[in-house]
Amino acid sequence: MTAERADDARILVRTREYRDSDWADWLLMSISLFPSYPADDLAAGMIEHRAREDAAVFVADRGDDSLAGFVEVGARRYADGCATSPVGYIEAWYVDADVRRRGIGRALLAAAEDWARARGYREMASDATLENAVSHAAHAHAGYEEVDRVVQFRKSLGDADGREGG
Ligand SMILES: CC(C)(COP(=O)(O)OP(=O)(O)OC[C@H]1O[C@@H](n2cnc3c(N)ncnc32)[C@H](O)[C@@H]1OP(=O)(O)O)[C@@H](O)C(=O)NCCC(=O)NCCS
C-alpha cells in the first residue's frame, strides 16, 4: 500500500497489506481492541477472516518490524444505508494509542477503500458502538456519514425442551 506519513521525526508509518509475520502484533492489537473477548476466540476469528477470498487485512507498519494499527475489511452483501451490493465493510479498525490523531486511522481506511474499489464495489460501510464517540468522529472525518443507530437485544430460548439454560 502507498499511504505514508511522517508527522513525527521518530515515526514513519507505512500502510501495507498484512503478511504472515504480522500475526503476533495483529493478535495483540485485536486483544486491545476487543478486551472482553478471549484471545483464542479472537485468533479463531482472525484465521477465519484470513481464509476468506473476499476479505483483506491492512496494517500500519512502524518500519522497525512492529505495527501501529490495522484494519480488517471484507465484502458484505447488504449494509444499512447502502444502495449497492456487495459493499466493502470495515470489520475492525485500530491504531495504537501512542500514534493516534496522526492520520494513520484514515490511511488504513483509505487502504481498505482502495481494496474495495479494486473489486468493483461502489460503497463502504462500517459500524461503531453507541458510546464510541472517538470512532464516530474519526469515521465522519474520513467521509463516512451516519445512517442509523441501533440497540441490539437477545433472549435465550432455553434448551430443546424449552428449559432455561442461559
Ligand atoms: C478510531 C481510531 C482507529 C482512529 O485512529 P487515528 O489514527 O487516531 O485516526 P486519525 O488520526 O486518522 O483521525 C482522524 C480524525 O478522527 C477524529 N478523531 C480521532 N481521534 C479523536 C479524538 N480522540 N477526539 C475527537 N476526534 C478524534 C479527528 O477528526 C481526526 O482528525 P484530526 O486529528 O485531524 O482532528 C483510533 O482512535 C482507535 O484505534 N481507537 C480505539 C479503537 C476503536 O475505537 N476502533 C474503532 C472501532 S469502530
Image (cartoon, rainbow, N blue to C red):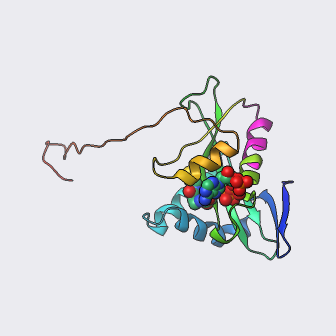
Q: Determine the residue positioned at 62% across, 22% down.
A: 83
Residue 51 in the image: x percent, y percent? 63, 52
54 above or below 64?
Answer: above
Residue 12 in the image: x percent, y percent? 84, 69
Total number of numbered labels?
A: 0
Q: Determine the residue positioned at 64% across, 72% down.
A: 24
Q: Determine the residue positioned at 57% across, 64% down.
A: 30
Residue 157 in the image: x percent, y percent? 21, 42
Quadrant of residue 47 within the rendered picture? bottom right
Residue 67 versus residue 74: which sits nearer the camera? 67
Residue 45 in the image: x percent, y percent? 53, 56
Residue 68 part of the magenta segment = no
Relative to 89, 160 lies left or right? left
Q: Quadrant of the N terminus?
A: bottom right
78 above or below 41?
Answer: above
Q: Is residue 62 visible?
A: yes
Q: Quadrant of ligand 1?
A: bottom right
Relative to 142, 81 lies left or right? left
Relative to 111, 76 lies left or right? left
Quadrant of residue 58 within the rendered picture? bottom right
Q: Is residue 46 visible?
A: no
Residue 7 versus residue 29: which sits nearer the camera? 7
Q: Read off the magenta span.
A: 111-121
Q: Determine the residue positioned at 13% across, 42% down.
A: 161
Residue 114 part of the magenta segment = yes
Q: Main secondary structure of the magenta part?
A: helix
